[in-house]
Amino acid sequence: MSARHWDIALGLFFVALALLLLFAWIPLDVESGITERHRRRISIGDAMAPTFVAIGFLLCGAAQAWSAWRQRSAERSGAGLDLGNLTYLAALIGLSVVALALMRWLGPAAVELARSLGADVSSYRELRDTAPWKYVGYLAGGFVLVFGLIAFIEHRLSWRTALIALLATAILAALYDLPFDDLLLPPNGDV
């Protein structure tokens, strides 16, 4: 199978996965809808995030399949996975694991550190929706993820990249947290 055919198959796989998520998994597994209305107040429902992810899968898969199908250039010779591809993939997975671990455990660790230094603070579970505790893990993990990915792809570290990562993560935190009173930044919902 040529690289072009693999690209088409991969795109169609994600289109099929998105359709399965949108029309089977999400409706059968998530009790609330995309939005919920409580006493004339509209809030985000449990199905919003997985629905957006599924729509992203659908759009990206369709774009992948379409661009591969329309590709008229000559087939690449020697296409396939090699040790360099697997090393690259392992490094990206490792970076993602580190960033997600920071998001998950840095907030509780910061609270425990503050408590061990004598600060009069409650447990992280009680503080997970108060500043600055709710931002610690999200901002650190997001910064490491964005900065690491950009630096990894560009093969260099720079202050510009650090500033972009900091601003992007802060803007995402603000867009996700500030408009909603009762929404917790990830992964604070299950802590």
Image: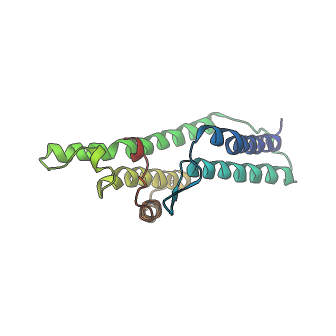
Q: Position of residue 97 (x, y in %)?
A: 46, 40
Is residue 80 at least partly visible in the picture? yes
Q: Quadrant of the N terminus?
A: top right
Say whether residue 147 is left or right of residue 36. left
Residue 65, x across and y down, in percent:
79, 49
> What residue is rendered at 40% in x and 52% in y?
138
Q: Is residue 73 visible?
A: no
Q: Locate residue 108, reporting x and y percent.
A: 29, 43
Count the marks: how many?
0
Direction from residue 77 to residue 86 in the image, left or right: left
Residue at 73 percent across and 36 percent down: it is 80
Indicate the quadrant where residue 77 lies: top right
Q: Position of residue 18 (x, y in %)?
A: 70, 44
Would residue 123 appear left or right of 45 to someone viewing this image? left
- Residue at 65% over, 42% down: 27
- Front position in the image: 5 or 115: 115
